[in-house]
Amino acid sequence: MLNKTMKKLLSAALVGTMAVSVLAGCGSSAPAAQPAGDAASGEAAAVDTSKEVELVLYVISDRPAGQDVVDENLNKLLKEKMNTTIKINWIGWAEYANKYPMLFSSGEQFDMAYCATWLNFANLARRGAFKPLDELLPTYAPKNYEMQSESALKQATIDGHIYAVPTLLPTYITYGSIYRGDLAAEAGMTDDIDTWEEVEQYGDWIKANHPEMEVIDVYAGNVELSLQWERMQGNYEIDSGNRYIFYDPSEEHPTVFALYDDPTAPEFYDMCYRFGEKGFWSKSALSDTDSTKTQNGKAAMRFHNIDTWSGYTVLHPEWDFKYGVMTSDIAHLPYTQDCMVISNTAQNPERAMMFWDLLTTDQEVYDAFYYGVLGTTYELNEEGQFTITDPDLYSTSAMWAARTFDLNRNQAGVPESYNTVRAEWEKNIQEGKGTERFTGFVFDTSNVTTQLANCQNVRQQYGWPLELGYVDPVAGLAEYKQKMQEAGIDDVIAEAQKQLDAYLEAQN
Amino acid sequence: MRFFKDFAEEFKAHKALFAMAAPAFFLVLIMQYLPMSGLVLAFKNFRYDMGVFRSPWNGLNNFKFLFSSGTGWLITKNTILYNLLNLITSQLLAVIVAIFITEIHAKYFKKVTQSVILLPYFISWVVVGVFVYNLFNYESGIVNSIMKAIGHEPINMYGIPAAWPFIICAFNAWKWTGYNSVIYIAAITGVDGEIHEAASIDGATIFQRIRYITLPSIRPTLVTMILLQVGRILRGDFEMFYQIVGMNGQLYNATDVIDTYVFRSLVTNPDIGMTAAATFYQSVLCFLIIMVVNAVVKRIDEDYALF
């Protein structure tokens, strides 16, 4: 354990961190982590690694067949570098919803886990599932800590403590149309399809010329037209789990509103009804569970993010998938979109943090961890892009939080525009402007859990059928609104407004 | 203290019997009774670092989501009605099938029939869900393909909630009839063949034999089966409903049961306390219902009661 000098150094580092966070709170945009990072880096080297440690890491995905080969290679490397081995446990996609929260309630001893906003990071943190990292992160992962941006750390901070190491790979709040370039060219549409008029024009053409295809890919649990509509107008959702409450980040003091109260809502639902009548999607879409329609050529268009698109381009280069950006204000996604947490039962949190520091700064370790064994599970081309040798053996790690901007490699075959578009976004994003001003905001739902549970249900029961044009747009909208109010959405909005105001207050 | 004295005497007298019962006793104790203490979660604001028993109390807050929007009554009603409907159809069909099968004397035909009827039991609801979608899908479903072929307008089954109780009931019966009938077949074959022979010789028709010999002889089995099912009357068969209806909100008013509602409400913002509250609600109601029904059965005929 820690000796006395260590403890002193630690508290020095802590004081440094606190001082910085106070300064940061005053709105200074100085490189935040500098002092704490310096104080910490000296001692990190002095940490005793003479005892061999096996770390246990949980990730969510189905265990690949080639994991053993990857583990062997990685552990040889880690043993050499820091006298540590790592055991990766997998929670399959079919069971993660039940099993993931159980990890923390069962008292099982493990060190690290993948976590994310969609795995309810904030909720779990608030309920004491993780170890606070206020000391651990700057002390044992100083290099990683130094690279963390101010807003990333703010997102990882719940009730005053840092509970996660956020990803170092920026991802973006974007939504847009992923569509078939080959078909669009046939239809004579060479410009990007990035307006609703163009979507309709493309849809009409598909319907007339390829009636066997579904125009817009909709399936159970994936009704995203309203999200696309709001993104197009530059509005942003209060919480990624509750995408029916929005605000306009461009306003000085944004007002939180429900989707149905957006002034453009009637226009939106009219459009949906029209699209539905035209047969752009199935009348039974809500019972369809096929999530692969676009990538398999059964559907002609889908609204989703840029990474989904780049995945499709690699799968089917011959279809020339194109991406029409339909988000008017692009900002970074919360960095806790992918993050690493230390379990409150961890036996070796110090070593886990050291491992994380190495993983996110050392290309050799990163490659061995993320892509596996060169020549066996992946190949590299001259540009350093990777190709997966056999997707059935091993593709890439499911610990997505380990990705960093510097170490991450592109997959060979992704069109150049993937990089140029993202570089463009990065250039245009201004710290503290528009949506970017709110990336640090985390909605604490603990006061309104009852209402949220009810609203969630109403959205599925009344919102989705309305959004797919299965019910009359005027009467359906009125019913949806009434049910939402009965479910207590006004409490949720009031709570969200209060927290958003407090967030802005703290910024100024 | 009378009880303990009696128990000690009993124990001394029948050591071997107690030893034999012990594994079952402890199994039930550990697997069934100890976990019940977890029901306190229904009244707690669960925290991972404090565990089940040290988490702070939360009053009745966890129950609110079930009732605050008026859905609580609807889903309770749906759950009970679906279970009653399913209970009646699947048991009735099972009895009829069992009688038919035992009356068939052609050996191979009997075996084949029985296997075919039993087969659906082994098909998972996930697969059944795919069947249902491919039957009723508006654009390319089998039903609508037939409709179009005979020149009829296609039917949007997913837009008619009233049809779904029947569809669900039909699939439930299809899946369970064969399995339940096995139990009745066992009961029927337990009847002494000589009684049937004697009745035939006395000139009883096949229907009279069924009415006066077979049915009375399976009555205890039937009552026990029904009582066992009634004990689960507030538990919706989650897999069945979830796979057949899925996320199709248009059908919820007609198809939502407690289990699906809880799953859907909490899947994005999970809360162990609220889930426990729903289970607690179901368990308490089930307990009350089974006590009442059992008491009624006891009134009518003591031999048939469960306890």
Image (cartoon, rainbow, N blue to C red):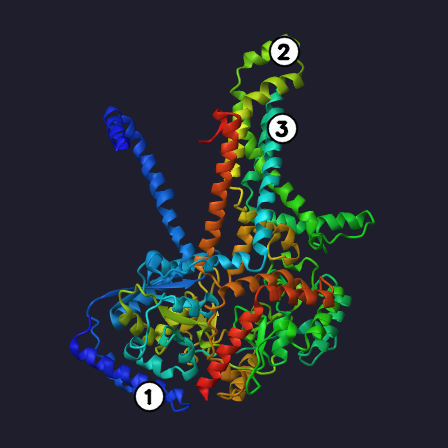
Chain letter of mark 2 equals B
Neighbourhood count class around disc 1 (C-alpha, 10 Å): few under 14, some 14–19, many 20 upward = some
Q: Give the farthest residue toward the left.
A: A4
Q: Position of residue B279 (x, y in %)?
A: 47, 50
The answer to whether one can see residue A37 in this image is: no
Q: CA distance from mark 3 to mark 1?
A: 80 Å
Q: Nearer the viewer, mark 1 or mark 2?
A: 2
**Residue where numbered disc 2 is placed:** B200
Chain letter of mark 1 equals A
Q: Position of residue A267 (x, y in %)?
A: 72, 75
Residue type at the position of mark 3: Ile
**Residue where numbered disc 1 is placed:** A34
Of B149 and A195, the residue lying toward us:
A195
Label 1 near label 3: C-beta < 8 Å?
no
Of B128 and A396, the residue lying toward us:
B128
Q: What numbered label is drawn on residue A300?
A: none
Q: Give the farthest residue toward the front.
A: B1
Q: What numbered label is drawn on residue B96?
A: 3
Q: Position of residue A473 (x, y in %)?
A: 72, 67
Q: CA distance from mark 2 to mark 3?
A: 21 Å
Q: Give the farthest residue toward the right.
A: B151
Q: Position of residue B12 (x, y in %)?
A: 23, 26
Q: Is residue A136 left or right of residue A336?
A: left
Q: Nearer the viewer, mark 3 or mark 1?
A: 3
Residue type at the position of mark 1: Gln
If the image is split into quadrants, where does the N terminus of chain A sit? bottom left
Neighbourhood count class around disc 3 (C-alpha, 10 Å): few under 14, some 14–19, many 20 upward = some
